[in-house]
Amino acid sequence: MPNINQFLEVDIRAGTIIQVQEFPEARKPAYKLKIDFGELGQKKSSAQITELYNQDMLLGKQILAVVNFPPRQIGPFLSEVLTLGVPNEEGHVVLVKPEINVQNGARLF
């Protein structure tokens, strides 16, 4: 059974999406995101969120992401963080975000 120490090993941080690009090379529809994590810097992520979000909706949106998993190669793109989301009733990803904006890089506890 997992314990609190295992949970705390997963480093989940708040960041603001500062760039969104189409990702036509992805097998499933996705965007390439650049996310500002404050003192942790800017990180890239691939996210399959095209069903519910367009590029304009995403720019400036604050989200949560795991920042300490190893980078993952997705086709020609290196995804550095795992952007978090949960499926809605139709199975489309809904992004996880702070209810109120917080400082970029703030850690989830």
Image (cartoon, rainbow, N blue to C red):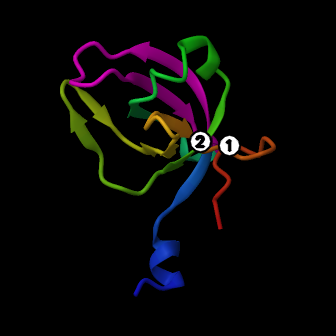
Please name the residue shown 64% across and 41% down the image.
Answer: 38
Please name the residue shown 45% across and 21% down the image.
Answer: 50
The N terminus: image quadrant? bottom left
Q: Amino acid at mark 2?
A: Phe
As drawn, the residue found furthest toward the right would be 100
Indicate the secondary structure of the residue bearing disc 1: loop
Give the camera-side residue of 17 and 39: 17
For residue 37, which numbered disc appears in the image?
Answer: 2
Please name the residue shown 41% across and 32% down the image.
Answer: 47
Give the camera-side residue of 67 and 85: 85
Q: Is residue 54 magenta?
A: no
Tell whether label 2 touches label 1 (CB within 8 Å).
yes
Please name the residue shown 46% across and 34% down the image.
Answer: 90
Q: Amino acid at mark 1?
A: Asn
For residue 54, which numbered disc appears in the image?
Answer: none
The C terminus: image quadrant? bottom right
**Residue 84 on image: x %, y %:** 50, 46
**Residue 29 on image: x %, y %:** 33, 21
Bounds of the magenta segment: 15-38
Q: Is residue 104 among the parts visible in the rendering?
A: yes
**Residue 88 on image: x %, y %:** 52, 40
Indicate the secondary structure of the residue bearing disc 2: loop
Give the residue at mark 1: 104
Query: Pointer 1: residues within 10 angstroms few (<14), some, or many (20+)?
Result: many
**46 relative to 58, above or below:** below
Q: Is residue 42 among the parts visible in the rendering?
A: no
In which quarter of the view is residue 12 placed? Answer: bottom right
Task: Specify whether 57 is left or right of 94.
Answer: right
Q: What whole-number distance in Å separates the C-alpha atoms at marks 1 and 2?
A: 5 Å
Task: Specify whether 100 is left or right of 31.
Answer: right
Q: Is residue 21 magenta?
A: yes
**Dot 1 or dot 2, earlier in sequence:** 2
